[in-house]
Image: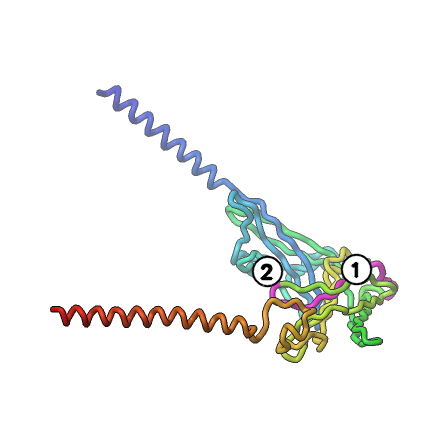
Amino acid sequence: MKNYLIIFFIIVAIFLSRNNVFAQEEEATVFEPSLGLNTIKRTDQTRDLITKLMYRADKGFVYPENHKVSFYYLDEGNEKFLATIKTTNDGSAILKLAANYVIPADEEGFMNFLARYEGNDTIAATEEQIAVKDLKMEMITEIIDSVKTVTVNAVSLASATDTIKEIEIGLFVERMFSDLPVADGMFDAGTVTMEFLKRIPGDKKGNIKVIARITENEIYGTVEVEKVLDWGIPSHLHIREVPQTRQLWTPIAPLWMIITLIIMLVGVWGHYIFSVIQLVRISKDGKNKS
């Protein structure tokens, strides 16, 4: 009997020790995150610093929420604190710098930004740095020989000798989920001209928001300028009046659809009424027979 008890306690001890080892291994798991950093200069000359914190786990990518990311700029190699922002449910943290907030540039004219995540017991610390030059863009819109034309002028604020050339720029229209690309071009001596040829639905007055954007350029980062124009198709027009838009919706349903829906509803409710009448008759006949 004693031998059986000894064997039993040995098995239990081995089982508990293995579970303890596995638990320690799980607790010791530290994920290596990535922290993307980008900067966007807006039309009103404000600048957004945007980070995205994420790491890969067994079930896929995880985007930590309510984790603190600190932003800095570098001045002669020294870190200058800007702010600490908590991540949202998609792992992003955005710091908006006012238009009059001056960021000192280095000898080459670059502004240096730093984003740092301190980490915790399960996620390792990480940081990301980006250097960009300051760029100012201006959008000029006009109709030349019945062609809607967008001209964008760009000037480097880092140095008067910087020439803006061979830099790609895209023309977009703001949509609900993502911006719709409508044209693109290449700067030559700080100027680019693009034709707006597409017919795009707008609001009831035909207004649309047109955006000219340099996307993640290695020197200037992302820079955009936008303007609201009446170059769209008024939304109250019926699809048959503007078939070029290829819309899948209209403010007013087609007549055949309305008639079909009325017939279906009449049929359904007719069956309900007929069933109720039959139940009432059956009930009355049962009472009369009794």
**SS for tag 1?**
strand
Quadrant in the picture for the C terminus: bottom left
Name the residue type under label 2: Ala
**SS for tag 2?**
strand
Measuring from the top left, give residue 279's x and y in whole percent.
25, 69
Mark 2 = which residue?
93
Q: Is residue 276 left or right of residue 144?
A: left
Quadrant in the picture for the N terminus: top left
Residue 100 visible, this angle:
no
Magenta span covers which residues? 160-177
Residue 38 visible, this angle:
yes
Disc marking residue 168 = 1
Which residue does the image show at 68% across and 64% down from the upper left? 180
- What is the count of numbered marks? 2
Labels 1, 2: front one: 1
The residue carrying pointer 1 sits among few (fewer than 14), some (14 to 19) or many (20 or more) residues within 10 Å by Cα, namely some
Name the residue type under label 1: Glu
